[in-house]
Image (cartoon, coloured by chain):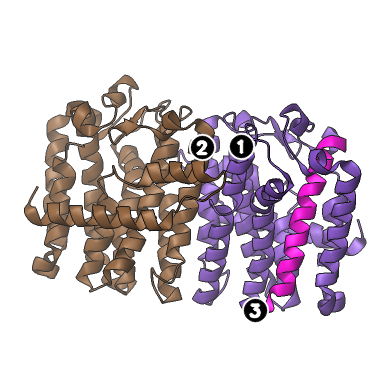
Chain colours: A brown, B purple
Amino acid sequence: MPDLLSEAFEQVQEDVDSAFDAFLPVPQDTRARLVEAMRYAVIGGGKRVRPLLVCATAKLFGVDRDAAIAAGCAVEAIHCYSLIHDDLPCMDDDDLRHGKPTLHKVYDEATAVLAGDCLHALAFDILSMQGTSSDPFVRSELIATLARASGHDGMAGGQMMDIVSDEQEYDLGQVTRLQQLKTGALLAASVEMGAILGRVPPEGRTHLRAYARDIGLAFQIADDLLDVEGDEQKAGKALRKDEGQGKQTFVTLMGRDKARAQAEMLVGQAGEHLSSYGEDARVLVELARFVVERDR
Amino acid sequence: MPDLLSEAFEQVQEDVDSAFDAFLPVPQDTRARLVEAMRYAVIGGGKRVRPLLVCATAKLFGVDRDAAIAAGCAVEAIHCYSLIHDDLPCMDDDDLRHGKPTLHKVYDEATAVLAGDCLHALAFDILSMQGTSSDPFVRSELIATLARASGHDGMAGGQMMDIVSDEQEYDLGQVTRLQQLKTGALLAASVEMGAILGRVPPEGRTHLRAYARDIGLAFQIADDLLDVEGDEQKAGKALRKDEGQGKQTFVTLMGRDKARAQAEMLVGQAGEHLSSYGEDARVLVELARFVVERDR
């Protein structure tokens, strides 16, 4: 990973961890177990791709770092809640996440459902705080963006399409649509929220949206390749799951070589969309490359 | 039920149903199952106590009806998502809700988790819409109120305390605190949101907050009495659960007679808090009485 990107990742990881630590003091009553579970899920572990997208985009427009970290935490809280719920026995039934036992394994299923629900609420709690933006219009737009991207017209809708795909054969168009919702919507929301914090009007977000769309798709193609080719130890989660479930993915539909070529093409294209930002966009451009080259 | 209150209920039930119908068109792809499950949970069935609280409070201050219904739908979406998740096998494992099979019985557990999550997102989606308020400050305040009331410092935190109460004996103070969070927080948020829509500044909400606190507690005492004395057919859900679980409730801790007297006292007191609003507050005053006299 280039130095600039790895430094940006480290800084975001540190800032997000300490922000979550401040957002989640453990109460002195029997809710302690719940808040400890929430902390287990959001502090340490994740790559923080989404918060980095928020921060790197926001930085293009000179946004205050603390505001960008707060918005990044909100997106990450949504991402983490979705992982907790996806890992439940009634969903993907996973035992390992970020190299650690999944939340319902460490606590129990009821706590996992509730901790996920509370992180979901925390995301909107954070976005409605003055610290995220002193301008209520900005706060409201951030909330609208995140709510839309995570609900039935976004991430959770994509997850439903994914569940149904066990019973139904999807073609490439359907898999693309599924992934645009399941993974792409939240990545796109991260970039969008950076632009909203930067007070970029919708008509000025065209290039950023094109960038986000490309890395969203590249991210998922890379995930599908990782499922086939990756190292479970490095990935920190179970792999080879798609094949076992007979699931249609970019890899099964296009083959490995074409899938890899497509991801490469998208990364190049993503970078070009940001050419007008010049050197300022270097972290975002390098992030696009990281997205397809990561091993976890 | 007095005519005025039953008319108010009917009108809110009708308006909330048609608003949810408009918010949730069924998509023409494999997310259809998810949105149908969401519709199953939020259209028809519930009493709509929370939306009525929003609307009746908002009406005190001349708020536009559509705005109040939208905010009421947001609270109801949170309430319904919490019921779906609470009914899951890993939580309360209930088969019946509002006289209908619970969502995971009709669909499956994975769909129930996701449909709950999507209703959660829908709540904030609705509150961030222009239709709820054209003033972003109002929208942001509504969102802050609902997010706080539903997360680990509110409803879900109370639910966690409730789960832990299976293993730990609570005293009356702890049961009161548990219920203030689990049930009271969302009822209080409903009244608060009506006041926010009415642009009542925080210092002008004292009487309304006192009213909400009293009916929240009365509501839960009535629920505990209903669990012991109620008719399952009318209630539309399983009863006699507290005793089986050896759970501390207002009834086990105070006895039926004292619990009923306490609920009666709270209802009277709740009404008095609204005396300055005179006849305008009649629906809210009658609603307080309904809360303890309901059979479901």
- Inspect the magenta stretch and tell me whether residue B211 lies in it: yes
Q: Which residue is mark 3?
A: B203
* Residue B29, above or below A235: below
Name the residue type under label 3.
Glu
Residue depicted at 43% across the width and 53% down the height: A24
**Looking at the rendering, in which quadrant would you find the C terminus of chain B?**
top right
The region drawn magenta spans: B204-229
> Which dot marks residue B163?
1
Residue A45 occupies which quadrant of the picture? top left
**Looking at the rendering, in which quadrant would you find the N terminus of chain B?**
bottom right
Residue A60 occupies which quadrant of the picture? bottom left
- Inspect the magenta stretch and tell me whether residue B268 lies in it: no
* Residue B62 image position (x, y, % from top left): 72, 78
Residue depicted at 28% across the width and 30% down the height: A237
* Residue B210, above or below B24: below
* Residue B32 image position (x, y, % from top left): 51, 41
* Left or right relative to A227: residue B116: right
Which one is in front, A261 or A110? A110
Instruction: Check whether the beta carbons of the residues at disc 1 and disc 2 lie within 8 A of each other.
Output: yes
Q: Which residue is mark 2?
A: A111
Residue depicted at 86% across the width and 53% down the height: B262
* Left or right relative to A104: residue A276: left
Q: Residues within 10 Å of mark 1 (few under 14, many from 20)?
A: some
- Marks 1, 3 in one chain: yes
Which one is in front, B134 or B96? B96
* Residue A290 image position (x, y, % from top left): 15, 47
